[in-house]
């Protein structure tokens, strides 16, 4: 049961007063059953519309979707809801657009059949406008935005491209910048270095200039004014004023001299001139005399910026002394060569390293070659007589390798003519200034002398033979007779032959001595060394002498065996000579003492007698060739004073020494020493 | 058996006394005055133990004979007797087996000759 206080009409009337816009439609025609005042206000109509069809009531809605929508709801029963829908309505006599949120609700009965549509609406025009405005604005803004966006986009794009380009450029720039910076810094450091270099060079140049071992000066301009002079250059002209003066004023003596022409030429043509040992007469000091001075120098033209020449650089060294010395040497050489030529000496030199033989034409002649023939060392050596060849070659070797002096006489067989010539060659190793050494010397012909010598030797040999031969017979006969007479009862006969033989021995010794000295006179004594025991030799001689010199006891103080390297025969004759002298000059019965002592690197032999002695002033002369002491005590002593001279010669040739110590009336001791 | 010796000496007086002295000393002596003899023939015939040659001055003749003998009888001792002052050093170099200086000591002569006798084998000559 519905409990109502109000009736339908009252309900409708109240509902119609509702603020909310409502309306109810029925049927296909959409009859407006009821509508609120609000709705009617929306339509811009009055209450007369109730009961009319919606279409009739609000005809301006035709063409607008609403009627169709309503009919759709009526047919389907599906409620339609919409917001913010535009509707054009005539309100206040004008067609205006309004916006509504509305619902067309389908009201169904129990059977589900639609019997009315409830229409509710809210006027949202303001809101809509606002929104639309906003929307519009938004849209506008959006469009603007889009446009702007587009613009922005393109601008962006541009910007991006530009940026890119910029970025590229920037990186390029950075790179270039870096490069530049690098280059600049390099340049800067180069520059600094260059500057430092320049400064250093300038200093170096300055030092060089001041310390240069050559005189340096710069002549400026056509007047050739001394622009710059280093100390060494000034020293060439001590005290003379040069700086700032033209050369002709500073050194007037070169006017007209060839050197001035050369200077002019260099200045004009720019061609460098090098002078070697050029003679330039120059005074040393102001108003000094002109001297012949020699210089090594360079004149170099100085170029200006345009390629012409505006000055001359001068580098100069004075070589006067060297040149003069060299000339003196050349003159000396020439003199020597002239001397060699005049003496008809043959000259030679052999380079000690390559052993190339350089004989002079005269030397080639000696060896029997033609003056312009090729004569190598072997060819020359081969011409030496074979008996002397090896010795000569050995001596040359010794001279070259040990610096021994070469001095030898030898026969040479002429290459073409076969003639025998005797030559004496002397030579020595000399060292050249360039470090090379040469065996150099001269040869001269001694054929005549040698032949003389040989003739003399032959003569002596013959004399020796002639003298000795009869002595041989004599001696042999006497010895045989002596042995036969040995047992003779006659005492005289028994000893006669022995006495006779002693005399023969004396004579024989004298002849030997004389022959030796003769040989010595014509040439040198030949010393043929061998190793032998000196002590044994002395003992031999002492024993032999004891046999012949029976009047004098001979005492030999034994010493150790002493090996010496000497000519045994010659030393033999020395010892014999000293002993025979001792015998000769001392009274009978007095002792002769012989001793032999080795000390260090020498051995000394002494022969002591108790004889007449020797005066102090004679002790040195006694070893002279023909010296014989004058004196009453010695007058009766036979012999010719050759023995001591020979002995002295022999000893000296052995690099030994011979001397005497003596007290007149008491005796003498003769000494000689030999190297061991 | 006495040793045989050929003696060549240019001076006849010296040759005489040497021949006599050597005879006295127990040698069979075959004396020759010059070097012109046919030594090889004489040696063949006399079978000497020693030959003594007179080495005069340069001694060319003596050298010639020496070489001749040594060529055929290399073991036959040949001695040089000489007035040369240097014979004592030269003999060896020249090829002689020994030397006698003139004038000589008789004893030295005997001594030197006998030195070479035991070596000589006359049967091998």
Image (tube, coloured by chain):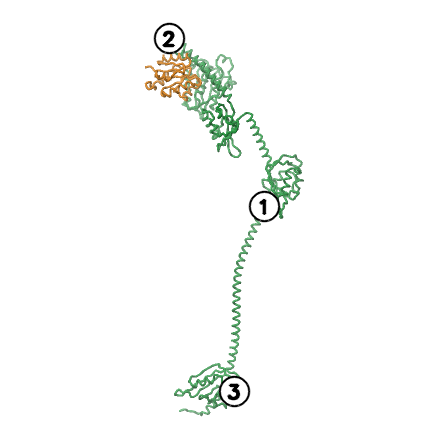
Picture quarter with the N terminus of chain A: bottom left
Where residue A44 is drawn, which disc sits there? 3
Q: Label 3 vs label 2: CA separation? A: 223 Å
Query: Mark 3 Cα within 10 Å, few/some/many (few <14, many 20+)?
Result: some
Of the image marks 2 and 1, the number of the one nearer the N terminus = 1
Question: Where does the image place residue A385, in percent across and percent down from the top left?
Answer: 46, 24
Q: Does dot 2 land on a helix, a strand or a loop?
A: loop
Chain letter for mark 3, please.
A
Give A488 or A95, whichever is nearer the viewer: A95
Chain letter for mark 2, please.
A
Q: Name the residue under label 2.
A: A488
Question: Where does the image place residue A227, in percent across and percent down from the top left?
Answer: 64, 43
Of the image marks 3 and 2, the number of the one nearer the N terminus = 3
* Residue A57 visible from this viewpoint: yes
Q: Label 3 vs label 1: CA separation? A: 117 Å
Give the drawing colour for chain B.
Answer: orange
Question: Where does the image place residue A89, in percent across and percent down from the top left?
Answer: 51, 85
Where is A343 relative to A294, above or below?
Answer: above
Query: Mark 1 Cα within 10 Å, few/some/many (few <14, many 20+)?
Result: few
């Amino acid at each position: 049961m519905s409990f109502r206080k109000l009736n339908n009409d009252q309900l409708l009337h109240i509902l119609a007063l509702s603020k909310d816009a409502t309306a109810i439609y029925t049927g296909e025609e959409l009859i407006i059953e009821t509508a609120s005042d609000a709705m009617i206000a929306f339509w811009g109509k009055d209450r007369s519309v109730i009961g009319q069809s919606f279409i009739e009531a609000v005809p301006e809605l035709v063409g607008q979707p609403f009627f169709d929508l309503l009919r759709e709801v009526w047919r389907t029963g599906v409620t339609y809801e919409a917001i913010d829908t535009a509707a054009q309505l005539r309100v206040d006599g004008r067609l205006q657009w309004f916006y509504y949120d509305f619902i067309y609700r389908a009201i169904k009965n129990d059977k589900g059949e639609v019997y009315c549509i409830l229409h509710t609406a809210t006027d949202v025009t303001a809101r809509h406008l606002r929104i639309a405005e906003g929307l519009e604005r938004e849209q506008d803004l959006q469009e603007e935005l889009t446009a702007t966006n587009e613009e922005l986009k393109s601008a962006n794009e541009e910007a991006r491209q530009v940026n890119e380009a910029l970025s590229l450029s920037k990186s390029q720039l950075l790179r270039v910048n870096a490069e530049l910076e690098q280059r600049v810094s390099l340049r800067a450091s180069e520059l600094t270095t260059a500057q430092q270099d320049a400064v250093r060079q300038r200093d170096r140049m300055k030092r060089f200039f001041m310390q240069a071992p050559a005189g340096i000066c710069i002549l400026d301009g056509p007047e050739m004014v001394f622009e710059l002079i280093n100390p060494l250059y000034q020293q060439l002209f001590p005290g003379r004023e040069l700086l700032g003066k033209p050369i002709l004023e500073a050194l007037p003596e070169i006017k007209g001299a060839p050197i001035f022409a050369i200077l002019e030429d260099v200045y004009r043509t720019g061609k460098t001139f090098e002078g070697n040992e050029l003679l330039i007469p120059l005074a040393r000091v102001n108003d000094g005399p002109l001297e012949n001075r020699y210089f090594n120098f360079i004149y170099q033209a100085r170029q200006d910026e345009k390629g012409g020449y505006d000055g001359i650089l001068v580098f100069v060294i004075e070589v006067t002394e060297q040149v003069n010395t060299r000339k003196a040497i050349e003159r000396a050489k020439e003199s020597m060569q002239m001397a060699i030529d005049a003496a008809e000496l043959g000259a030679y030199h052999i380079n000690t390293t390559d052993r190339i033989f350089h004989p002079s034409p005269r030397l080639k002649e000696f060896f029997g070659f033609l003056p312009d023939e090729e004569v190598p060392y072997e060819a020359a050596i081969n011409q030496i007589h074979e008996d002397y060849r090896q010795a000569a070659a050995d001596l040359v070797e010794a001279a070259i390798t040990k610096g021994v002096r070469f001095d030898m006489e030898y026969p040479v067989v002429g290459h073409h003519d076969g003639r025998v010539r005797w030559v004496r060659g002397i030579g020595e190793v000399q060292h050249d200034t360039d470090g090379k050494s040469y065996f150099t010397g001269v040869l001269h012909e001694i054929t005549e002398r040698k032949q003389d010598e040989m003739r003399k030797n032959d003569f002596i040999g013959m004399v020796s033979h002639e003298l000795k031969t009869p002595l041989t017979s004599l001696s042999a006969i006497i010895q045989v007779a002596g042995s036969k007479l040995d047992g003779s009862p006659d005492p005289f006969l028994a000893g006669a032959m022995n006495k006779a033989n002693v005399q023969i021995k004396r004579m024989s010794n004298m002849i030997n001595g004389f022959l030796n000295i003769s040989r010595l006179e014509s040439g040198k004594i030949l010393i043929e060394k061998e190793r032998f025991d000196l002590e044994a030799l002395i003992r031999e001689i002492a024993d032999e002498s004891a046999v012949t010199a029976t009047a004098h006891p001979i005492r030999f103080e034994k010493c150790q065996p002493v090996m010496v390297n000497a000519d045994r025969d010659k030393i033999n004759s020395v010892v014999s000579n000293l002993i025979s002298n001792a015998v000769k000059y001392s009274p009978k019965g007095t002792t002769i003492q012989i001793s032999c002592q080795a000390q260090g690197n020498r051995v000394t032999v002494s022969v002591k007698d108790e004889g007449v002695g020797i005066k102090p002033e004679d002790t040195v002369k006694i070893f002279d060739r023909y010296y014989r002491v004058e004196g009453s005590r010695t007058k009766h002593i036979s012999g010719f004073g050759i023995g001591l001279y020979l002995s002295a010669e022999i000893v000296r040739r052995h690099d030994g020494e011979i001397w005497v110590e003596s007290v007149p009336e008491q005796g003498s001791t003769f000494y000689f020493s030999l190297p061991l | 058996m006495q040793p045989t010796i050929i003696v060549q000496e240019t001076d006849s007086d010296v040759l005489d006394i040497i021949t006599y002295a050597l005879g006295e000393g127990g040698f069979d002596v075959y004396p020759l005055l010059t070097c012109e003899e046919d030594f090889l023939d004489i040696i063949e015939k006399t079978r000497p133990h020693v030959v003594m040659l007179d080495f005069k001055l340069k001694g060319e003749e003596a050298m010639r004979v020496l070489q001749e003998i040594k060529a055929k009888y290399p073991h036959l001792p040949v001695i040089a007797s000489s007035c040369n002052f240097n014979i004592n050093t030269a003999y060896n170099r020249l090829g002689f087996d020994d030397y006698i200086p003139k004038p000589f000591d008789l004893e030295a002569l005997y001594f030197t000759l006998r030195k070479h006798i035991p070596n000589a084998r006359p049967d091998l000559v």
